[in-house]
Image (tube, grey):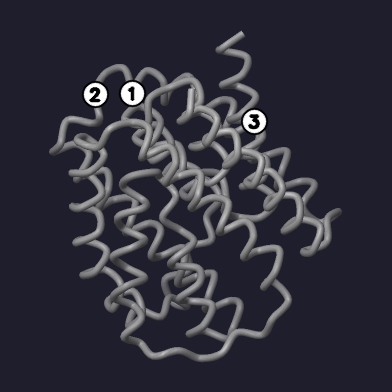
Amino acid sequence: MDYLYIGGVLLAAYFIRGISGFGSGLVAVPLLALKLPLTFVVPLILLTDFTASLVLGGLNFKQVVWSEVRRLLPAELIGVATGTLLLVSLPKAPMLIGLGSFVILFALRNLLLANRESKPISPWWAWPAGIIGGTVGALFGTGGPPYVIYLSHRLRDKGLFRATFSGLAFADGLIRIVSFSLSGLLHTQIALAYLAAMPVALAALWIGSHVHTKLTNAQMIKLISLILIGSGISLYFKAIS
């Protein structure tokens, strides 16, 4: 039953990734953390997400706004180092509560603010966005939301936003893979789990990519947000128990 549950979570997470282009970590990490330790789940999803990014493509280096990437990367390095250290040292219950709170807050933000027009913000916000994104990404494998919030308030053009976010996600994945390798979080069991997970993830990506045109953007945001709220609440119960 545990294998069926894990397979179902991966199928749902990467189905959503196929539809929306993001969100697999936000769905998979909290739900898999109910059955597996975060020190196993986060490196596993890091590898599957990195591969999913390569499979889906979307990296158009000519459209990447490299000035924004350069602003975020130094702060992200600080965050990744901090998050990796916390991942191997923090007790389990506070981490689960922190992850649950983060996921629920992001889901509520999606529901409440999705239709509001973003306003330009100062490039100095790249520092808190990068540090928080790097820390949360290393801790929970879900560092995308701070980057999405920052870039959506800096880049008006959707093509530039998508390309820049993809370029940043690619760099972020490489940084965390190196950081996790040096800290010993990537090992043989993770590699075996990754090989077992990829067929499910790839199948889900293929299905999601073929049905994404049937959903409106509003329906997609509501679906993802409701799943995230449910997974965040379940983490609270896990931490309490």
Q: Mark 1 points at which residue?
A: 190
> Which of pointers 1 and 3 lies earlier in the amino acid sequence?
3
Mark 3 neighbour class, 10 Å CA radius: few under 14, some 14 to 19, many 20 or more: many
Task: Reply above or below: 240 against 144.
Answer: above
At label 2, the amino acid type is: His
Q: Position of residue 107 (x, y in %)?
A: 62, 56
Give coordinates of residue 11: x percent, y percent. Answer: 64, 30
Q: Which residue is situated farthest in the left direction here? A: 182
Give coordinates of residue 139: x percent, y percent.
Answer: 33, 45
| Residue shown at the point (38%, 56%) measured from the top left | 170
Query: Dot 2 corresponds to which residue?
Result: 187
Q: Kindly identify the residue that appears in the image at 53 percent across and 61 percent down.
A: 58
Distance from the alpha carbon under mark 2 to that under mark 3: 24 Å
Quadrant where the N terminus sits is top right
Residue nearer the viewer, 78 or 169: 78
Marks 1 and 2 in Cβ contact (< 8 Å): yes
Q: Distance between the residues labelled 1 and 3?
A: 18 Å
Mark 3 — residue?
Answer: 11
The Cα atoms of the two marked residues, 1 and 2, are separated by 5 Å
> Looking at the image, how many numbered discs can be counted on the residues?
3
